Image (cartoon, rainbow, N blue to C red):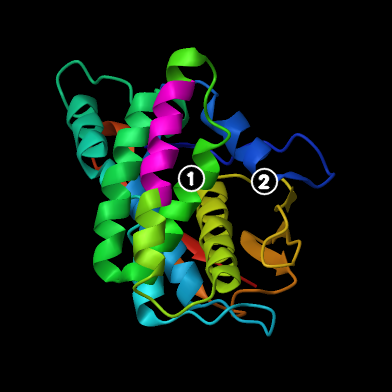
């Protein structure tokens, strides 16, 4: 689950900060009252971003790859549904951000997400597997976790080899397509978390992207998403209040 403050998130600097650091800071704040955005909803928004990407430096995305990006967090569906039920229970249990999940929870959701994304086609399954392999390489914190991650990486390396043999992209192209997924994923996380700080993204597909906010809209430099594109993502309020249990958050790219 991605948690978002009810009020606009405060900025901490006028400098450009790493996009992931901004997301992590916001997710680690207390969220007694907040908006909840499910991981599948966040992934669907990432897929919509991918469908609107533009620029000569970008690898070409077909419908199957866009669908894989939109499904890349589908494996979180059941845990997020359970969190919503807990939020709507008599006890109104406070939801947990995805960032507070254990390594085992991550690996389980990632594995299911890859299986679902692979239904879009072998190339789509490959880039989602590769995406999570990249994340897993930096996720282990102690010996027990390192062993779990090592098994996950070994399994995914074998899966990637099988999927790569069933599609036509070169290894370099698959790496670039994984970059597109990672960019769309981080952009969606940034927006779903309600971030407002100036952000700098890691260098993906040979491009370093910066993001600023202007009049409640987002501006990317270089402009990798079609100017004027508008999106929506569903959010549920925790705890639910009479007259408002959820809303659609509007997103506009300048």
Dot 1: element: helix
Q: Residue at label 2?
A: 19
Q: What stretch is highlighted in magenta?
A: 146-157
- Which is in the foreground here, disc 1 or disc 2? 1
The image shows residue 16, relative to residue 80, as above or below, that is below
Residue 114 badge = none
Percent of width and height locating residue 135: 53, 41
Foreground: 179 or 224?
A: 179
For image coordinates 76% across by 61% down, the residue present is 208
Which quadrant is the C terminus positioned in? bottom right
Residue 133 badge = 1
Disc 1 residue crowd, few under 14, some 14–19, many 20+, Cα 10 Å: many
Foreground: 56 or 175?
A: 175
Residue extending farthest bottom: 56
Percent of width and height locating residue 172: 60, 70
Q: Viewed as shown, does residue 221 lie left or right of 127?
A: right
- Based on the picture, tell me whether residue 207 belongs to the magenta stretch: no
Foreground: 58 or 85?
A: 58
Image quarter of residue 183: bottom right
Foreground: 242 or 3?
A: 3
Q: Viewed as shown, does residue 136 lie left or right of 108?
A: right
For image coordinates 63% across by 41% down, the residue present is 20
Residue 108 appearing in the image: yes
Image quarter of residue 231: bottom left
Q: Which of marks 1 and 2 is nearer the N terminus?
A: 2
For image coordinates 62% across by 59% down, the residue present is 216
- Based on the picture, tell me whether residue 154 belongs to the magenta stretch: yes
Percent of width and height locating residue 34: 41, 32
What predominant SS class does the magenta segment belong to?
helix
């Amino acid at each position: 689950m991605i948690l978002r403050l009810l009020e606009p998130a405060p900025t901490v600097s006028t400098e450009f900060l790493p996009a992931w650091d901004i997301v992590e800071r916001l997710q680690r704040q207390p969220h007694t009252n907040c908006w909840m955005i499910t991981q599948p909803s966040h992934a669907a928004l990432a897929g919509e971003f991918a469908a609107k990407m533009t620029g000569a430096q970008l690898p070409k995305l077909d419908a199957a790859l866009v669908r894989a990006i939109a499904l890349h967090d589908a494996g979180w569906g059941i845990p997020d549904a359970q969190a919503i039920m807990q939020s709507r229970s008599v006890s109104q249990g406070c939801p947990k951000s995805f960032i507070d999940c254990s390594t085992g929870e991550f690996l389980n959701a990632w594995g299911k997400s890859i299986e679902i994304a692979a239904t879009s086609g072998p190339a789509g399954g490959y880039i989602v597997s590769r995406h999570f392999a990249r994340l897993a390489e930096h996720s282990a914190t102690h010996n027990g976790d390192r062993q779990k991650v090592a098994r996950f990486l070994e399994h995914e390396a074998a899966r990637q080899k099988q999927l790569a043999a069933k599609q036509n992209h070169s290894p370099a192209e698959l790496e670039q397509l994984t970059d597109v997924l990672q960019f769309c994923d981080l952009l969606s996380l940034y927006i779903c978390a309600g971030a407002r700080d100036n952000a700098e993204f890691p260098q993906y597909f040979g491009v370093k992207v910066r993001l600023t906010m202007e009049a409640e809209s987002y501006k990317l430099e270089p402009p990798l998403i079609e100017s004027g594109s508008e999106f929506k993502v569903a959010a549920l309020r925790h705890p639910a209040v009479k007259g408002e249990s959820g809303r659609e958050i509007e997103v506009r790219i300048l």
